[in-house]
Amino acid sequence: MSRTGGTDAPRRLCSLQVRAIGFELPGDPTTSKSVEKQAEELTRLAASLLLYQGVLAGKPAQAFLSLLMHLQKGSPLKLLEHYGELYRALAADGKASWQDYLLDQIVRGGESPFAKAASKGEPTTHLLQAVAHDLDVLQQLAVTERTLANWVKDTAYGVSKSWLAAASSLAAPSGADGPTPVLQLQPQQQQGSPSGSRGSPDTSAAQQRAPTWAGQAPAWLLPPLSPEQRGGLMADIAGQWRWSEAAGLLQRYHTAHGHGLVSMHHILTWTGSSLAAQDVLKGAGSLDSLSVGLPRNSALLNRLERVAQELARSTNSARALTSGPPHHWSLGSDPLTRWQLCCALLGLLEAAAAEGKGPAFRAVVVPAGQLGSLAELAWALSLHPRARFLVLLQAGDSLPPAALADLAAMLSGYGGFSWPANATLIAGFAGDAPEPLQPVLCNILKWGPPGEA
């Protein structure tokens, strides 16, 4: 377990062993319990999770659970194999330690009913006790790699010193500084605090981007945290004496940023059955990157700025969407120009959100091969009602006639299944939109204020 120092200086995680008569923690190297007994207790703890069982669903977690099972009654060879699986899975995920993986999964939220409810703005107070229980369980499961490797060494014969040293090397060096906590989800401090005093604002760039609010939660989900801010949130949880003390912090985080991939990424892609990260495109919305083929002062860009303003105005609050369906757009041009326009629109919307003039949009790229699963995409987006999505359907000409009719019915609210109100569609075509879609799509290249040609 660990505890942080005062808030006036950079926080540093310090290891602290707790020993008392009749009180021994699983994974404590000084415990008198056998390795088999400690592994059995950890296995029982893992089975007791109430809301965060999904944290243990990934490959690293499954390898960890298999390792615990073989520490109890497995063969030495299988024990070494499962430790190797855990090591490889953590390295492949870019995690510095098993604890780092657990914290990342906790912040992600995934399939946790608590994270889902908070991201939708639904009541979660009744779940906080279960959240606190699970966080304390996961803290006990966060056994260091050195402890695990020593358990393997003590249980499996013939393990060399070089294996022990290598198997313990994944974790960050002992005593190294963890990520600097930069996330501030508490209400903003009053202005005018003396420089250097407790609660004075951090002037780092990461801190300036950290979300803050007072009182009511935001109407729409805020943008995903930067990697530095996300690391700071994980460090804040790890720095608690008991991880259960971070239950309220997680509640505010999910309420502000959502859960799962939507809470982590600006740009997503649709695989046909689920959303996946597509951050390779992040930064493509910068207007400076569009100097080739789309000058900053071009008529196309000026028109696009009006489209962005219209989107921001019409979606400033959730209530605005209940008065009617949002605008959906068509783009009739060559593929390169269509993509440049979409990237520019993303950049404009991101700038508007940063200035507080509109919601933070997540872009969803729909590949040509997934056009037949738009109904499934609509359902997936509806599960995040407080997120705003910009769905980019570049290959609209590939839609078969039946799919065109279904899409037109969804966008117009007919056909038994309507398109979610929090998602705006931009469909690309070589020319004008097909006739079935013209009543529900507004042409970006021809649109303008009333009375404008």
Image (cartoon, grey):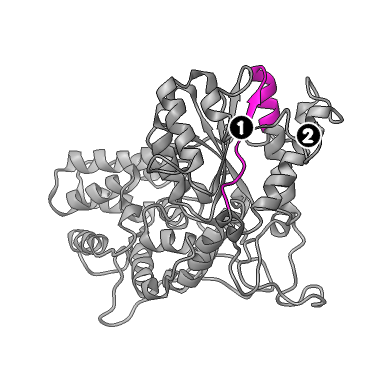
Q: Secondary structure at mark 1?
A: helix
Mark 2 belongs to which amino acid?
Answer: Arg
Residue 197 image offset from top left, x and y in percent: 76, 77
Residue 392 appears in which quarter of the rendering?
top right
Instruction: Give the answer, above or below, for where 70 lies relative to 330.
Output: below
The verdict on residue 325 being magenta is yes
Residue range (magenta): 324-342
What is the x, y in percent for residue 429?
A: 60, 21
Q: Is residue 94 visible?
A: yes
Q: Quarter of the image containing the N terminus?
A: bottom left
Residue 80 vertical placement versus 107 (above, below): above
Residue 166, percent from left and from top: 40, 41
Describe residue 112's horizontal placement relative to residue 67 as left or right. right
Residue type marked 1 = Leu
| Residue depicted at x 27% and y 53% | 151
> In this orientation, which residue lies closer to the viewer: 200 or 172?
200
Mark 1 neighbour class, 10 Å CA radius: few under 14, some 14 to 19, many 20 or more: few
Which one is in front, 102 or 367?
367
Residue wearing tag 2: 303
Give how far across and how far down residue 262 sits, in percent. 51, 48
- Quadrant in which the C terminus appears: top right
- The mark found on residue 77 in the picture is none
In the figure, 171 relative to 276: above or below?
A: below
Q: Are marks 1 and 2 in contact (CB under 8 Å)?
A: no
Tell me, for residue 281, which label it has, or none: 1
Q: Which residue is rendered at x = 78% and y = 20% of the image? A: 293
Discs 1/2, front = 2
Give the residue furthest to the bottom: 21
